[in-house]
């Protein structure tokens, strides 16, 4: 099983700032089969990024994904108030597994 | 627009059974694999099971032998039969659609989610 470790566990930033979230895999994620989700309280997760760097339909351009192998990053450039949420990475190179999440809070 | 409506959750005693349903609309249901993903209260996400459009199934180790996923393509519905429930199965259960357009496979991530249904296992 591929274990995903996200860092930091929580991040406190102000609107307009840049957020950088990390996801590290315990082994190489084949074909960069990694996605990012956003989850707000009481809601289901929403797909943001697939294939490590491809934005899902309807996702604003301020969200971008990068990385390969075992190290992946989600960057949010110019935080909007609605971006404060929990973010999860997930790999699908094997049986699907999720990271433990990063909570993005308003400073 | 894709719409997934989860139902069937509730309170059940340890060792009991429950069947969850997920009614889908807005896409050609039989072409897409469907999954169940769960989230324990205050915790992260955990994949449970998948069924392809033509009925191939796969399970996480922690539910294999206790849970059964199935689908009825004529009713656009996917099910999760949960037997021998444990306290640690307490969670919100989400059905989630795989984006792969093909009846016999899946990619393994989730582009649409239901609203979730809460399962509580407690005596």
Image (tube, rainbow, N blue to C red):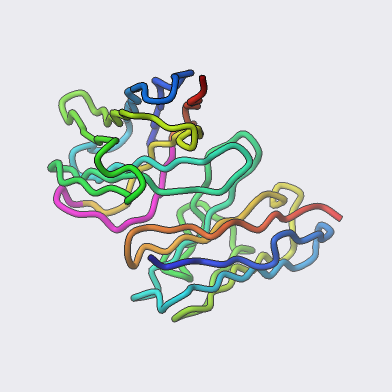
Quick one: B29 or A3, which is closer to the camera?
A3
Question: Measuring 28% from the left and 28% from the top, which residue is drawn there?
Answer: B81
Question: Measuring 52% from the left and 47% from the top, which residue is drawn there?
Answer: A46
Tell me residue A92's x, y (percent).
Answer: 36, 62
Q: Which residues are magenta?
A: B102-113
Verify whether residue B111 appears in magenta: yes
Give above or below for A57 relative to B121: below
Quick one: B68 or A46, which is closer to the camera?
B68
Q: Which quarter of the figure is the N terminus of chain A placed in?
A: bottom left
Q: Which quarter of the figure is the C terminus of chain A placed in?
A: bottom right
Dominant SS of magenta comes to loop
Question: Measuring 36% from the left and 21% from the top, which residue is drawn there?
Answer: B16
Give above or below for A82 relative to B72: below
Verify whether residue B80 appears in magenta: no
Q: Is residue A64 left or right of residue B110?
A: right
- In this view, the residue farthest toward the right is A107
Question: Measuring 34% from the left and 67% from the top, which residue is drawn there?
Answer: A93
Question: Across the whole image, how many numbered discs are drawn on residues?
Answer: 0
Give above or below for A86 relative to A35: above
Tell me residue B51's x, y (percent).
Answer: 23, 43
Q: Is residue B51 left or right of residue A3?
A: left
Q: Is residue A49 left or right of residue A75?
A: left
Tell me residue A95's x, y (percent).
Answer: 33, 59
Tell me residue A43's x, y (percent).
Answer: 58, 36
Give above or below for A88 relative to B32: below
């Amino acid at each position: 099983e591929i274990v995903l470790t996200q860092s930091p566990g929580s991040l406190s930033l102000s609107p307009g700032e840049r957020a950088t979230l990390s996801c590290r895999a315990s082994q190489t994620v084949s074909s960069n089969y990694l996605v990012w989700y956003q989850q707000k309280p009481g809601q289901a997760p929403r797909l943001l990024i697939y294939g490590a760097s491809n934005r899902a339909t309807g996702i604003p351009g301020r969200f971008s994904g990068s990385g390969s192998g075992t190290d992946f990053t989600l960057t949010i450039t110019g935080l909007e108030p609605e971006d404060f949420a929990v973010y999860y990475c997930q790999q699908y190179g094997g049986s699907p597994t999720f990271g433990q999440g990063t909570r993005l809070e308003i400073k | 627009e894709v719409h997934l409506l989860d139902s069937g959750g509730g309170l059940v005693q340890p060792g009991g059974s429950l069947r969850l349903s997920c009614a889908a609309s807005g896409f050609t249901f039989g072409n897409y694999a469907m999954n169940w993903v769960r989230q324990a209260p205050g915790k992260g996400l955990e994949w449970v099971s998948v069924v392809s459009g033509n009925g191939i199934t796969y399970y996480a180790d922690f539910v294999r032998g206790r849970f059964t996923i199935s689908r009825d393509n004529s009713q656009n519905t996917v099910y999760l039969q949960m037997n021998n429930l444990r306290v640690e199965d307490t969670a919100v259960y989400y059905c989630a659609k795989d984006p792969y357009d093909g009846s016999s496979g899946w990619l393994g991530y989730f582009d649409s989610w239901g609203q979730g249904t809460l399962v509580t296992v407690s005596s």
